[in-house]
Image: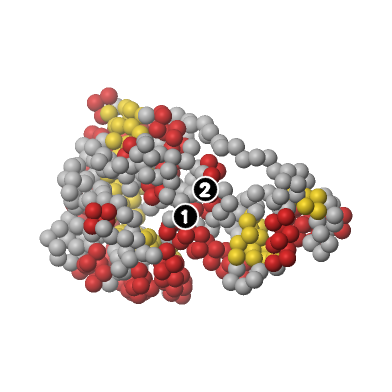
Amino acid sequence: MTTGLDVPALSGRRLFLDPDVFLVPTDDTNVLAYAPLPGLLLEVNPSAAAWLEQLRSPGGSPVSPGYETIAAQLRAARVLLDSPPLPRIPKRPRVAPFRPGQVSLFLTGGCNLRCVYCHSRGGERPVTLDPCVASTAVEAVSRTVRSLGQSQFTVHLHGGGEPTSVPELLKRVVGDAERIAARQGLGVRFSLGTNGVMSEAMARWVIQHIHRATVSMDGPPEIQDRQRPLADGSGSHALLRRTLALFDDAGFSYSLRMTVTRESVEQLPRSVRYLIASSRAATIKAEPVFTAGRALSRGLEPPEAQGFVEAFSEADELARQEGRRLVYSGCRPDIISPRFCAAAAGSFCVTPEGAISACYEVVDPNDERAARFFFGHVRPEQDRLDIDEQRRSWLAHQTVDNMAECTDCFAKWHCAGDCLAKTQLGSVAASAKRLHRSDRCIINRELTRRSLLATFRSGADLRASDASDCD
């Protein structure tokens, strides 16, 4: 023990529990005492749990006989304190100058699909990105990366629609970025977010010029064709399967992303099984539909929380058996972070109109959330970025240690308060209101609880990184 006191000497000593120690229910009468930051996970019986609760009182509590060993473990982890914990004060992070090290370029609002739930209403806004805007953004990134002594940067290619639906623009943007990188003596890597519905020639170009992709696919033909039809209403499944076959034959690196609706949630395990059989993708990401954009106008509802949890858990076990990885963005027990994603830490997304957004899900200027997530504009004619520092400051403040409603949640350092685009109403008038204890919050907590319990029972170490991403 590294407690500084012998275990017997702790008996009767008045101690205090750090607020970031949580009692997590198991599937029986015991609970897990969980301290996320030091990575401490102990199983305790109900009486020990009651004693730990007493340690939360303003006056602390003496170490009762029989609890000296638990007290020593908690004290060694520095979560059992000799004096009352200091009150939590909301942090006002210092906002550094905007110096982006990577960029997401949204090439077009046009799309060859009409997905029933599309958050950006792809295909209804056929605007395209000015190549000069793209080059100005890439130049800004290359200068930052070079000044930091780094050797390469990444350009993410997305669309409020489908980036491969504007092939000449896509190729030009990639070529321009390669020339800019070469001029700076840097390497550049490209990632692509795509619906996978493209010509064979386009697929082969992607294989040759793009380093990795995220491909949207919702399941077997009847689900894919219903949820992700072509613009003319016909099915997209066969065309997508052709692209995946080309990717797999070439050994191209990609993951799959599926959207789960209330109608399709019961089929999630079967859909995951189908995606495993249909592709070599090592990672499959399953996300419940969010009611924005086309989903909102069509009245689509997300899956009921417990139904998603049960379906996801079954599908997760199936994926593990097949050597694949099933992920959901709100369950990240391997990550410790105050931020859900880079939206609160300098994300650089350029919309087709040239606006700068902190979130890849908020790229339409008509989106209510744009009032919070748009924080600037690319000015190619002046070779500069116009930045709204007030909005950047607001975004930087959106960390879980500043979210009072998350204070007592054991999952808070993992989900980090969840996706800002899904929990913030966005408008200035509603900026203080968060959608707390929503279905996503319930899902986050329950899937994280199950993951922690599985980790404890397996005897595996808690090894959390401090990095987070949003893909």
Query: What separation in Å lies between label 2 and label 1 (alpha carbons)?
Result: 9 Å
- Residue 40 sits in which quadrant? bottom right
Q: Which residue is mark 1?
A: 437
Q: Nearer the viewer, residue 4 or 439?
A: 439
Local crowd size for mark 1, using a 10 Å CA cut-off: few (<14), some (14–19), many (≥20): some
Q: Is residue 379 visible?
A: yes
| Residue at position x 38%, y 52% in the image | 471
Q: Nearer the viewer, residue 209 or 165?
A: 165
Q: Where residue 262 is drawn, which disc sits there?
A: none
The answer to whether the residue labelled 2 contacts the one labelled 1, judged by CB atoms less than 8 Å apart, is: yes
| Left or right: 55, with 359 as reference point | right
Residue 54 at x, y percent in the picture: 72, 55
| Left or right: 337, with 170 as reference point | right
Q: Residue furthest top?
A: 382
Q: Secondary structure at mark 2?
A: helix
Q: Which callout, 2 or 1, points at the residue further toward the start of the chain?
A: 2
Q: How is the image coloured?
A: secondary structure
Residue type at the position of mark 2: Glu
Q: Nearer the viewer, residue 268 or 48?
A: 48
| Left or right: 209, with 125 as reference point | right
Q: Which residue is mark 2?
A: 405
Residue 310 at x, y percent in the picture: 44, 71
**Above or below, comparing residue 22 to residue 189 in the picture:** below
